[in-house]
Amino acid sequence: MDSSLRGAVERKDVPGVVALITDRERVLYQSAFGVADVATGRPLTRDALFRIASMTKPVTSVALMQFVEQGRIALDDPAEKYLPELAGVKVFESFDAATGAYKLRPSASAPTVRQFLTHTSGLGYPFTSATLRDFKPRVGETYPFGGPLLFDPGQRWHYGTSVDVVGRLVEVLSGQKLEDYFHDHIFVPLKMDDTSYNVPEAKGPRLVAQQQRAGEHMDGAIELQNPQPPLTIAAPVGGGGLASTADDYGRFTRMLLNGGTLDGVRVLKAETVALMGQNHIGAVSVPALKSALPRSADFTFIADGRDKWGLGFLITVDQVQGKRSPGSLSWGGINNTYFWIDPTRGIAGVIMMQYLPFADAKALSVYDTFERGAYQLVNAER
């Protein structure tokens, strides 16, 4: 494992990587290789802080499921019941890519809490939708959470700002800001002491630099982003923005492996964790989306049209030799941070890099090698 990860750094496939494997009881493997900053050569350490972007989404989903458990909200409630700004949401009827002209119509149904948790609400991102990338609203028009819907709720899966809505639901139900709710109800109970939206100044030197491949198409050597993002986030959202360490996120995955409990502290009921790992999109499937912007490559890590989605996670359907079991849960963040949770085998993996574009072929290759090594390690130990 060490030699494969070190080799990826020495070949300059990736500037640096921190990787961790855990089972239900303990960390089985943890290492760090390479640099935290390509400009200074600062060494990458195991306790390095990474901006985990969309690996925030499972945390937000866990937070909302705490309210589902309490009976404060139901999965099939229309979200507009709690967020009036979603009332009367509109759907694209047509969009002319050449002129930007568009027609909208009322949505066939009000998107539900479940649809926001599963990316079937109709919301997208500009980097996952050419329509949203090119959409310019008319003067006076505003659209909550990033624009009109791309399709009627429940019709398709499309990656977008849906979990930002989930985050707002958490804030409305709790009466707290996301940062505070996560801190009190997830991070403190799980001893995730290094996970937050706003990075304290004292921890700034541990933060990995934001980097990207050079060139218009982000296909060159890895360089520093300019400017670097600040340590603070003015308005945290449910869909991204957390900074964390491999160790902290390993604790989060270990809680899920243990059915909602870690070190004697319970944050979710076992039946809630099981529910989150079930297919919640029915016959709809998860497509390997084409990227609409250079900051992300195509979603080649998805088994196109076969994978499913739970409440906060991609669900692997296929068994690939030497890799995770069917029913495993996973996702990643745009800066090439990834995790998977394999309840069947009782292990989870976290691998963190920090550069764009998302789903970079070389980052995915390192991820694949790491995952295969994880199962070799577990097989040897058992």
Image (cartoon, helix red, strand yellow):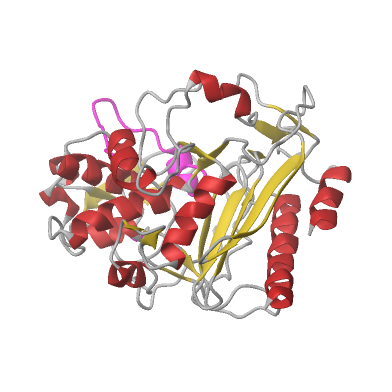
Residue 318 as seen in the image, left or right of residue 181: right
- Which residue is painted at 37% across and 61% down in the image? 261
In the picture, the quarter occupied by the N terminus is bottom right
Q: Position of residue 76 (x, y in %)?
A: 18, 64
Residue 321, quarter of picture: bottom right
- Residue reaching furthest to the front: 264
Asked whether the viewer can see residue 122, the reply is no
Residue 375 as seen in the image, left or right of residue 72: right
Q: Position of residue 267 (x, y in %)?
A: 31, 56
Task: Count every numbered label the image shows and give the total.
Answer: 0
In the picture, the quarter occupied by the C terminus is bottom right
Residue 269, quarter of picture: bottom left
Q: Main secondary structure of the magenta part?
A: loop
Judge whether residue 184 is colored magenta.
no
- Which residue is painted at 61% across and 80% down in the image? 319
| Along the viewing direction, whichever of 54 and 128 lies nearer the viewer | 54
Residue 316 as seen in the image, left or right of residue 164: right
| Along the viewing direction, whichever of 183 and 15 lies nearer the viewer | 183
Residue 295 as seen in the image, left or right of residue 282: right
- Which residue is painted at 32% across and 70% down in the image? 270
Residue 282 sits above or below residue 89 on the image: below
Residue range corresponding to the magenta coloring: 120-145
Residue 231 sits above or below residue 77 on the image: above
